[in-house]
Amino acid sequence: MQNRHEDPHQHHGHDHHGHEAEGSALPEIALRVKALESILVEKGYVDPAAIDAIVETYETKVGPRNGARVVAKAWSDPAYLSRLRTDATAAIAELGFTGRQGEHMRVVENTPPVSGKPGRHNLVVCTLCSCYPWSVLGLPPIWYKAAPYRAKAVIDPRGVLADFGVTLPKATEIRVWDSTAELRYLVLPLRPAGTEGWSEDRLADLVTRDSMIGTGLALTPGARRPGEAA
Amino acid sequence: MNGAQDLGGMMGFGPVMPEQNEPIFHAEWEKRALGITLCCGALGEWNIDVSRHARETLHPADYLSSSYYEIWTKALVKLLASRGLVSPEELVAGRSLVPPKATRPPLHVADVPARLKAGGPCDRPLDRAPRFQIGDRVRTINFHPTTHTRLPRYARDKLGVIEARQGSFVFPDTNAHGKGEDPQWIYSVVFKGTELWGADSDPMLSVAIDLWEPYLEPA
């Protein structure tokens, strides 16, 4: 189930070049989806342009930069943080982020250790399907929907964090949120040290998608984003 | 139901495998699968709980060996057949064989932004008081329905504490089976790791689960 990809030809969009002969090289599921779409369009149930518009929305408009703006504002503006705590859906909507799979938002805050009280790290999962806050993070990554993460997050979250190269102090509380209902969770990561006085735009660049799921931490100033070339 | 979707606590799947420079879609067909799933949902022939139940009733071996967009597609095929929208014969033939059924109008491209922006809120007013207060100790029920439920197996018959009240929402256990929305209070219930997983659990672990009132008894 994890990272099951098909023929590498697909990754280069060869099915767009219009070579009919390549149709036979498509994996069965691709042919099935193609047949299904064509019947749905023929029967008038589906407008193919609507599919394009949905895809374009999640490829170009709705993604983790939305969530990063929420986090950066929460770090910078105590009044905004207070509104996020009281009504996260409304506070997030102030920035224009609303809609599908973000109708009922909750923000959960990572906290540092304070005078003997342990810090807390939050991690979000949906063990039963793939519930995810689309309006602030876009579509979920493949690993979030796959069995290893959904199985392991609730029983061995430190093991999951290790899979992401993250180690937390033993004394840190780990709180896992299993999104069984229609509430959607955004993690507010700890603000990195050395960012005093930074603008919201600069801060937002430190906020990774994984830090808002809880499988990562916000970047420290000067660090490379995960996946960036050295 | 105790299907393959109920994965919390299962072992043997190996490590989580984050991808470097992960694409939003891994193939063109995934884009179309997302689009047709959302567009067919807009026809109003089923709700999100029916959809989820269609996915979890895939054979466990099929579920566990399918990617998530494959799961969506297989469930969509089942739903389209069960509602008389697209028959298995039509899928084999690759074309329409009978006239379309009357549904809500299809989602038009011009309405996509507004529809995605609006979403589908599931909170519903409820004119009875919540049974539990913040801080109450509760025990989850022990049940194994063959029908849809959102109380995961790993959290059944467990002691927890109500940490927050989340409002009143559609109840999936009825809504997935044409028995109405039957709104119920939802609570954020917190369980210690040791309660869920025993003495070997990480002592610093707690799990919060959003649970509908019928899943809970006073403890």
Image (spheres, rainbow, N blue to C red):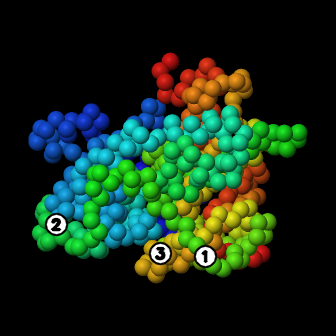
Q: Which mark is residue B126?
A: 1
Q: Nearer the viewer, mark 2 or mark 3?
A: 3
- Amino acid at dot 1: Leu
Q: Quadrant of residue B152?
A: bottom right
Q: Which subunit holds the residue at mark 2?
A: B
The Cα–Cα distance between marks 2 and 1, rounded to whole angstroms, is 43 Å
Name which residue lies at 35% across and 63% down.
B41
- Disc 2: which residue: B90
Q: Which mark is residue B175?
A: 3
Q: Position of residue B172 (x, y in %)?
A: 51, 72
The Cα–Cα distance between marks 3 and 1, rounded to whole angstroms, is 16 Å
Mark 1, secondary structure of its residue: loop
User: Is the residue at mark 2 from the same chain as the one at mark 1?
Assistant: yes
At label 2, counting other C-alpha atoms closer than 10 Å, the crowd grade (few under 14, some 14-19, many 20 or more) is some
Mark 3, secondary structure of its residue: helix
Name which residue lies at 72% across and 55% down.
B206
- Image vertical order of residue A22 relative to residue B160, above or below: above
The Cα–Cα distance between marks 2 and 3, rounded to whole angstroms, is 29 Å
